[in-house]
Image (cartoon, rainbow, N blue to C red):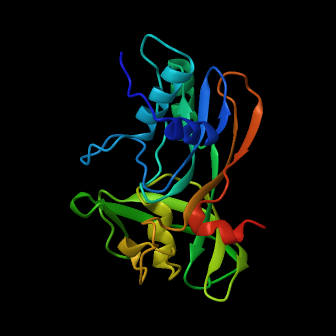
Amino acid sequence: MLYRRLTEQEYQDAAGRILYEDNHLLVVNKKAGEIVQADKTEDETITDLYKSYIAMRDEKPGSVFIGVPHRLDRPVSGIVLLAKTSKALARLNEMFRKGDIHKYYWALVCATPPAPEGKLSGHIYRIESQNKSYMCRPGAMRKDARLAELEYRLLDKTDRYWLLEVKLLTGRHHQIRCQLSDIGCIIKGDLKYGAPRSNPDGSICLHSRRVTFVHPVRKTEMTIEAPLPPSMLFLQNH
């Protein structure tokens, strides 16, 4: 199979964003604006980018396998776990299903949270035509709503923003964005969920910062952290 030949700059950029790689796993630092899997825009996916990268780097004449066990929203940056073998993909899928992969996000929000740390629990439903999720209100439960839970803690604050670390306990569509907005903590730049203005680069200040898990094949404990994106670099001392 033929893959797109990357420019030298694209090749070096892709190489520099690899956070971990072995025969089974590829962990990369996604830029805001990249898509993980194909959508109606038909833009190049991060999986296609790294298939092209590996084909060039390893001079592979055949197809390159990259499986996707989870996604990040397009305007979100940070860690994406990819599988390089079908065995790893099947095991990662099961680990995500069982909650054995622990994901921590950094969110820069526009208001102080109700408490320095806490747990948010509620039911979320998605309106496909809007590509947006909503919280169910008491007495108005919907059949298509699903339980959404996360934990957060306040890490720091600036003159205008508050930095939260969020641990996902479930994986629902736009979950962090929806639940934080529901408590008044709208993510900086997130127009869809109520932010007053966008970020110049079109990102939102939500970053998949750290992931901890047991390697699906080698069974070793792993913790991987992603560098901050340009929109959050002023927080890099944390």
Side of 114 where 224 appears, left or right: right
Would you identify the image quadrant in which residue 43 lies? top left
The image shows residue 36 at horizontal and vertical percentages of: 43, 43
Identify the image quadrant of the N terminus: top left
Q: Residue at x 36, y 40 (%)?
A: 44
Side of 22 where 204 appears, left or right: left
- Residue found at the very far top of the displayed protein: 61
Side of 235 where 147 appears, left or right: left
Is 48 situated above or below 126? above
Q: Nearer the viewer, residue 162 or 94?
A: 162
Identify the image quadrant of the C terminus: bottom right
Q: Residue at x 59, y 44 (%)?
A: 99
Is 169 situated above or below 179? above
Q: Is residue 98 visible?
A: no
- Residue found at the very far left of the displayed protein: 129
Is 1 situated above or below 10? above
Q: Residue at x 36, y 18 (%)?
A: 2
The image shows residue 89 at horizontal and vertical percentages of: 52, 26
Would you identify the image quadrant in which residue 222 lies? top right
Q: Is residue 134 visible?
A: yes
The image shows residue 132 at horizontal and vertical percentages of: 32, 64
Side of 153 where 79 appears, left or right: left
Q: Residue at x 61, y 28 (%)?
A: 25
